[in-house]
Structures are given as structure tokens and as C-alpha cells.
Amino acid sequence: MTHITGEVQEVEGKVALVTGAASGIGRAIAELLHARGAKVVAEDINPEVEGLARDGLTPFVADITQDGAAERAVGLAVERFGRLDILVNNAGRILYKPVVEMTREDWNWQMETNVTGAFLHSREAMKVMMPNRSGAIVNIASYAAYFAFPGIAAYTASKGALAQLTRTLALEAIEYGIRVNAIGVGDVVTNLLNHFMEDGRSFLGEHGKNAPIGRAAKPEEIAEIVAFLASDRASFMVGSVVMADGGMSVAIG
């Protein structure tokens, strides 16, 4: 796939915070925003995020679900780079378990990252964006916000909640010049399933063939959409959930 990195600097001079940045979609987002001219704080619970360290790209190891993590991450962006213009709530995880077998701890495990972490980081990002009367928040949702499959009730509920958080926050934020949007992501070849499956990347690649496009996405393809939504080129987009799922959401019936 051909990228246009270097030709379009749509986020040049901006400061971004990306959660879940150690691998997969988050890493691709952090690296692309940096390549397009942004200063980036890359946050992840996985210490491997430290491998992203370079001039203008600062890693931060933290659990986004814990009290204080969002405050520290946003504070680091402001301390290191002077402001915060972009927040990408990418960190996410998935639980495969029927509802009747699911514990309250299972449910909370899912919700804390996919919804609560996004809420906490959005709240703290808004506080520093509001005085500047500008900013962009991009949430990584899923086509599972609208469609369901057996065994992923907690995941679909969390992504549905994230879509609604996006819409409501967008209405609260726009009067301060802050745009909030989300991406309804389909199958992407990442390590999302590896915590319970030997080769989750292959599974996602195969499952992606069910989409009308006939394949799963690469993380870099989602990063391109994030870069657009985070930029002034998307200045009229408010509260949108942009579907990037290879046609899954229009084919399911």
C-alpha cells in the first residue's frame, strides 16, 4: 500500500496523545502523526511502548483505567510540548465469553479500558483544550457498536457506549472549538486476540475475508483516517462515527 507521508503534513505543529500505542493500530497512529509533523505522547500499559522514543515522540507507561493516569498523560504532553491538540482514545481489549458464563469482574475488565479509560482521558484532555478553543478527539470504536455476534456481549456493549460517548461529548465540546469523532473499525490485523488465542492475527486476517472488500485492514489504513479526523481538513465533522470496516456494516443482514 502506498502512503503519502511527507506530502501531507495535516497535523504539523500539533501535539497529540495516543493511548494503546505499543502495537497495532495505536502504534501506527502514533508513528503516522509524528511523521506528519505532530509531537506525540504514546501511552500504553505495555513497557514495549518505550521503544517508540525519539525526538518529538515521548512514550508513557501507564494503565489508562487507573485514577491519575489520564491526568499524568495529559500533564506530560503539556509539560513536554506546551499544549495538547489531539487525543486518540485507541486502547481497547476484547472478551470472548457467553453472558451466562461472564462474571462481574469480566464485565468490568472489558468496560474499564474501552469506555472508562476513554472517558477519563477525554475529560482531562478537554480541560486543557478548552482555554485554546480548539482541539480534536478521535475514538477508535468498531462496527460491533452496531452489530453483534455471540460471545462478545461485553465488547459490543463497550463499543456501543463509546459511540454514544462520542456523540454526547461532541455536543458538549463543539462550543469550545473541539471536535469529537469516532471510527467504526472492522477487522484489522493486530494482536487484539492474542491474550486468549494462539494466533489472533491470522484469525483476524481470515475473518476479514467475510467483508465485501474481501480482506482485513492494516493498522496503517486506520491511522490515515485518524490523521484526517484529527486535522483541520475535517473541520466540519462533529460527532460522526466514520465506518472503516471494508463494507461489513452495510452487508450484514
Image (cartoon, rainbow, N blue to C red):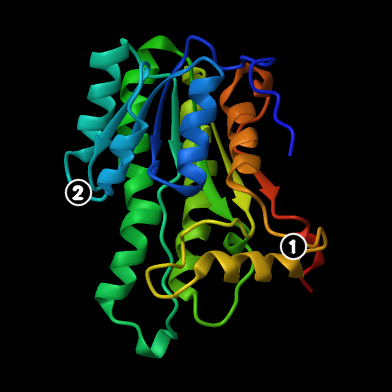
Q: Amino acid at mark 1?
A: Met
Marker disc for residue 185:
none
Q: Residue at x 54, y 64 (%)?
A: 201
Rounded to the nearest angstrom, the CA distance separating label 1 from label 2 is 34 Å
Residue 178 makes an appearance in the image: no
Q: Residue at x 74, y 67 (%)?
A: 209
- Residue tagged by mark 2? 66
Residue 242 in the image, given as x and y percentages of width and height = 67, 44
Front-most of residues 175 and 12: 12
Q: Earlier in the sequence, mark 1 or mark 2?
A: 2
Is 21 rendered above or below residue 195? above
> The C terminus is located in which quarter?
bottom right
> The N terminus is located in which quarter?
top right
* Total numbered circles: 2
Q: Residue at x 39, y 53 (%)?
A: 115
- Residue tagged by mark 1? 248
Residue 194 makes an appearance in the image: yes
Mark 2: secondary structure? loop
Is 141 rendered above or below residue 151? above
Front-most of residues 251 and 22: 22
